Image (spheres, helix red, strand yellow):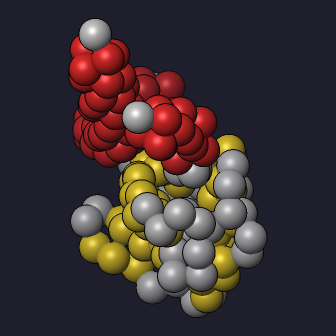
Amino acid sequence: MKNITLLLVSILCMLPIIVSAHTTISSSTPTEGQIITEELTELKVEFAGEIEKRSTLILKKDNNEMALSTITVDEKSLIGTLSTPLSNGNYVLTWSIAAKDGHVMTGDIPFSVELAETEEAPSRNEGETENEAIVEDTEADDEPMVADQQENTLKSSETSNNSSNFATISVIVLIILLSGGIWILFRKKR
């Protein structure tokens, strides 16, 4: 009886350590939903805890994977470099890490690049002012980007919610099992 009680107390003491073993993003460059207006050749995701060397990054533009020159895994950072700066468009940076406890986690960071163009202004229709042409062009470009960003943000939220839900459900199941075990022990005593 004392051995079972000791085992249950030990499991309860280890529970916070098990739950805190998973890591989260502490910062990233670029951040989720950010619009980059300067040349970008380095992508960086920093985590709250240490990550394994087998962690990786994938960069996609319009669902087409782009090659990264190098991917470096530091203690808590995942860094990808590009041989040339990113061009204008919508991107998704997908990270996949293995935390020190071996738990694999993934997530997406959607962002867009909007560098100032050095080309001549587009031609205008007769009678249309320059401001009207710019407003129409901007509105046409923004609609697909906003929809893509919202969709990517939703996918990223679902991924992080799934891992949070799993941890929460695991903790609840453990508490129920421990409560049932303690109830059975005290029931047998009477």
Q: Is residue 47 above or below residue 76?
A: above
- How far from the left and from the top, in percent, is residue 86? 55, 69
Name which quarter of the figure residue 172 lies in.
top left
**Can residue 183 be seen in this snapshot?**
no
Residue 35 at what x, y percent from top left? 56, 43
Residue at the far right in the pictured view: 75
Q: Nearer the viewer, residue 82 or 132?
A: 82
Q: Residue furthest front?
A: 190
Q: Position of residue 127 (x, y in %)?
A: 34, 26
Whether residue 22 can be seen here:
yes
| The N terminus lies in quadrant | top left
Please tell me which residue lies in front, 177 or 27: 177
Quarter of the figure with the C terminus: top left
Q: Residue at x 66, y 77 (%)?
A: 73
Q: Quadrant of residue 137?
A: top left
Position of residue 96 measured from the top left corner of the image (x, y, whole percent): 44, 66
Instruction: Residue lying at the far top in this picture: please name it.
Output: 190
Residue 86 relative to residue 181: left or right: right
Q: Nearer the viewer, residue 111 or 20?
A: 20
Q: Residue at x 51, y 82 (%)?
A: 54
126 or 48, nearer to the observer: 48
- Quarter of image, res 184: top left
Report the residue at 40% width, 58% height from top: 106
Q: Is residue 41 above or below residue 154?
A: below
Vertical order, 82 against 105 (above or below): below
In the displayed structure, does residue 178 sit left or right of residue 23?
left
How many numbered circles does the render carry?
Answer: 0
**Rendered residue at 68%/63% (across/down):** 50
